[in-house]
Amino acid sequence: MDRQPIIEFQDFSFQYYSQSEPTLHNINLKIHRGEKVLIVGPSGSGKSTLGHCLNGLIPFSYKGEIHGSLKIDGLETRDQDIFNLSKMIGTVLQDADGQFVGLTVGEDVAFALENDNIPNAEMHERVKKVAEMVDMERQLKSSPYELSGGQKQRTSLAGVMIDDVDILLFDEPLANLDPATGKTAIEIIDAVHADSHKTIIIIEHRLEDVLHRSVDRIIMINDGRIIADMNPHELVSSTILVENGIREPLYVTALKYAGVKVTSEMQPGHITTLKTELSRNALATWYYAIQADNRENTNPSILKMENISFSYDGVRQILDDINFDIRKGEMVSIVGKNGAGKSTLAKLLCGFEKEDRGAILYKGENIRSKTIKERAEIIGLVMQNPNQMISKPMIYDEIALGLRLRNISEEQIAERVEKVLKICGLAPFKSWPISALSYGQKKRVTIASILVLDPQILILDEPTAGQDYRHYTEIMEFLVEINKLGVTIIMITHDMHLMLEYTPRAIVLAGGRKIADAAASVVLTDSRVIEEANLKLTSLFNLARMAGIKDGTQFVQGFIDYERRIKNR
């Protein structure tokens, strides 16, 4: 590896004109040519701002005050323009759809070459070559919007690689991807790094997923400052991750629960490099000492799907003969690959679409004839993005909106809103404008606006999407408390940590069919289900096998129950 730095921050600070304090403070960082670096940090830490400084969005699109120096390939970035910077560093956004400009994959990949007036024959040759590098040569005539999540990522990557840039920047590449597609995305990035020796920078808070493949260094940022600059083994064996709100790998947490002192000599940065020789006995002793909880729910049925089938166009089945029975007070995950039918299932439950065949039963009663408004009295839907649900400028008015539409008296509204504000931890912000809230607080407002209607069932679409570990935990523990009040909770999610830690039961969809309905620990250790539904084998199962524990599924369940007991202390 060339030790000449290709990126160099020297005493670099940045403050947005709209902010009273700098977002980045005295950053000193060198990234060498050919390195593969992961930048992690909690929400609001400044990691995305650092990325914007690298690709030129700062200062050319997002204005602010810069102090210090940032050089890329020896050139001071503030002396360049955004076009010149785009020839040095290519950015793959977390929202691939927002990056597409062509009607076909081939057109999209060729866009930069067309801008540079490259001759047609050369353009076709270069597009074909880069498409082969990311395994997209067969999809060049397809529309980008018809692709899977993983194929969209590959197309975006090809679009920035076509310019043969020296640096590739990936901004939260795992957002919006199902587990297996996310795993593939990390493998693609690793293969590009190995083949091209380009400098790779990944900004992501899903640490364990990125560490599916090796990285040279991890840069931890918090409060606009570099907290750590270490190799994965050093960082994972320290306390820095937990102290700064980043979820450490599950297998590391399990080792700590078993009383093992995790050190860098154990090479714990990746599950594949972990040395378990000195921890096998401790893991086995801990495993046999923990007892599984009896989580069986014996409450009566609250929501049942009987032989449900649905198609949007009358030709292609989106849901095919779906059957399940959810009991009152359960907390259930619905998981599966993108396009498996999860969101369509939620639309049917809420009445936005009508099933073609079968019946949806609420407490034994068929609700086909109930209107959307009538279903909203019993089933509440919280969308993934809170900004798509919020329509009022003030918190109180947003939460009260549904009650006002039902012509409830203002006295009753005040009483119910006050109650839900307390439940949701929003009481201190009662008179605040929505614009003053963080993303996580907005999420709570959307949940509160549904809870105030007193639904019996709450459906949440990706409740933790885009959340760092601290905010993720706050939202999930809050939902656990709501669940204890008797509200049945159904979560549509790609987050396997969420499924394992919080929902005793998982319903798995693939190709519009239900392929599993079992404990989360069973689902994430069943190779057939994992492959068919684009899930990912949990590292806890791998740890059990490496420690010589035969029943990996029971080990995973024991971990879940042990962690839940710790949190309930």
Image (spheres, rainbow, N blue to C red):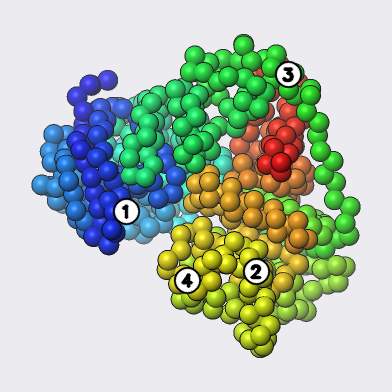
Relative to 505, does residue 98 appear above or below in the rendering? below
Residue 505 point in image, percent of width and height: 75, 47
Q: Earlier in the sequence, mark 2 or mark 4?
A: 2
Q: CA distance from mark 1 to mark 3?
A: 56 Å
Marks 2,3: beta carbons within 8 A: no
**Element type at marker 3?**
helix
Mark seen at residue 107: 1
SS assignment at label 4: loop
Q: Residues within 10 Å of mark 4 (few under 14, many from 20)?
A: some
Q: Secondary structure at mark 2?
A: helix
Which residue matches tag 4?
432
- Residue with the mark numbered 3: 284
Q: For mark 2, what is the residue?
A: 420
- Is tag 1's residue or tag 3's residue first in the polypeptide sequence? 1
Residues 539 and 428: in front is 428
Horizontal arrangement in the rendering, residue 25 relative to residue 306 (left or right): left
- Image coordinates for residue 58, horizontal then vertical, percent: 23, 52
Relative to 25, 380 lies left or right: right
Q: Earlier in the sequence, mark 4 or mark 1?
A: 1
